[in-house]
Amino acid sequence: MGRLDFDRYSLNIRPRRRAVSFIPGFGAHRLTVNLECTAAGTWPKDAAHSVTGALWAADLPRHSGWLGHLVQLEPLKAAEFAVPTELEVTLTDAQLAALEQARSGADLRLRLDMVVTALAPTGKWPARNLQEQIDIPDAEWSKEVTEIGHGAFVTVLVPITDNTGRATAARRLREAQTAIRAGDFETAVAKARTALDAVRPPNHQAAHSQAVNKKAKDRTQDERWTMLLQAAYDLFGGAHHDDPGTTEHFTWSRADAVTAIATTSGLLSRLDEQP
């Protein structure tokens, strides 16, 4: 919570529970930062304040993180109870795409650099500077971005049980996410491949040999799951092994790595529903 001290009174500004929200537009969207302000002390009657400044995405490697100038729709009023206030920034589709690529699935930290100016006489210099940080979990930010139609996300809860294999697989998937954030997509896919070891049942090879000899339309539902599992295992194995003439030439993008993690997470989560 940021505090601003004026002559004989102070303002305490903090983010509301839903710190950000979007209104979609045509190629550009309105990002609203939702704040609230509480005053303490003795302030002039009907004291109001203007807020200017800039919004930044903080802690992004190789990026300054500047997003845009803050726009205030209504003056910020001083009151002893929490007064909601909204600051807005316009973000284009290109900005959102670049931001999503830069954060690579990590939580988002926004920084507000604000100048708050008292609009009523204060007897002293009326402007104060304030810097406020807002930490937004990945799932919360991704939900906001998805609702404006800019992207899609899937959060898969991987069960953590006493099963050693599944616990190891969950750890490898976390390591894969870390590798994506570091830009090491081949390692991320390789980690997803090793996590699949916990998903393959003991009879997998026999079940696959039986399924592969059938026409696709004749396979049962279980056999089709077996084919999917084996296909993922074979594909992601290209990052885990360097076979001369084949997998040694494979290249992996961020989208490939995200797909590998999502596929493996779904297959691992599905185990929790098996009898």
Image: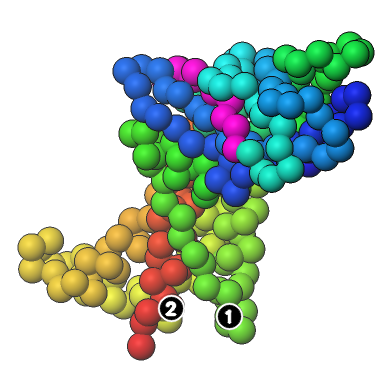
The answer to whether 175 is drawn above or below residue 51 in the figure is: below
- Locate the N terminus by quadrant: top right
Q: Is residue 269 visible?
A: yes
* Colouring convention used in this rendered image of the protein: rainbow
- At label 2, the amino acid type is Asp
Q: What percent of the width, then of the height, locates residue 12?
A: 78, 38
What span is in magenta?
84-94
Label 1 Cα crowd, 10 Å radius (few <14 / some 14-19 / many 20+) = few
Where residue 41 sits, quadrant-wise, is top right
Label 2 Cα crowd, 10 Å radius (few <14 / some 14-19 / many 20+) = few
The answer to whether 34 is drawn above or below residue 128 in the figure is: below
- Judge left or right: residue 237 versus residue 207: right
Q: Residue at x 71, y 37 (%)?
A: 79
Residue 212: within the magenta?
no
Under circle 2, the secondary element is helix
Q: What percent of the width, then of the height, locates residue 261?
A: 48, 52
The image's mark for residue 161 is 1
The alpha-carbon separation of the residues under discs 2 and 1 comes to: 9 Å
Q: Residue furthest front?
A: 45
